[in-house]
Image (spheres, grey):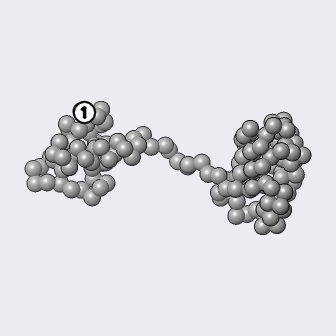
Amino acid sequence: MRVEVKAKNNAELVRKLRESLSDEVTEVYINLRPTKEILVRILENAPNVRKISCPPSLYPKVSKKVIAALAQMGIKLLPEGYPRGRPRKYDEGTVRRVRELIRGGMSAKEVSESLGIPLRTVYYMAKQVGGERSRSGGRF
């Protein structure tokens, strides 16, 4: 079983670890740097844990000795990232489809209407590829 424990400071994290971990837990994600104290609390409250993960920005700050000691016990300490920033509204497939339709001869307005994407967004997606405009004015 996987458990995610997020806190604002180490004291809060230790408290939440005590509350949320049990014998069934095999994977733990924590959002703070895994210090020796935190790792001891994880091992006390979840003796069957096999994987502990933290944000990639904090992983380099963990002692190599701690990582080696955990590895000897059969526990992996790994960086695990969540994407930062605002999620994209349109996936890469939609962007690719817009570009294909424009290259195929459809006007930006026709693409906008057929896919239900704002006209300004269609222009933006088409321009990102390198601005392949033809000489016909409004068409790319």
| Residue depicted at x 24% and y 33% | 114
Q: Position of residue 58 (x, y in %)?
A: 70, 58
Q: Is residue 88 visible?
A: yes
Left or right: 63, with 117 as reference point: right
Q: Position of residue 66 (x, y in %)?
A: 82, 62
Quarter holding the N terminus is top right
Residue holding disc 1: 114
As drawn, which residue projects farthest toward the left? 136
| Residue depicted at x 75% and y 45% | 28
Q: Position of residue 74 (x, y in %)?
A: 80, 55
Which amino acid type is marked by label 1?
Ser
Q: Number of callouts in the render?
A: 1
| Residue depicted at x 74% and y 45% | 27
Residue 31 drawn above or below residue 69? above
| Residue depicted at x 83% and y 51% | 38
As drawn, which residue projects farthest toward the right? 44
Q: Position of residue 52 (x, y in %)?
A: 75, 50
Q: Is residue 15 visible?
A: no
Left or right: 136, with 59 as reference point: left
Residue in front for this viewpoint, 53 or 131: 53
* Element assignment for label 1: helix
Alpha-carbon neighbours of circle 1 within 10 Å: few (<14), some, or many (≥20)? few
Q: Quadrant of residue 129?
A: bottom left
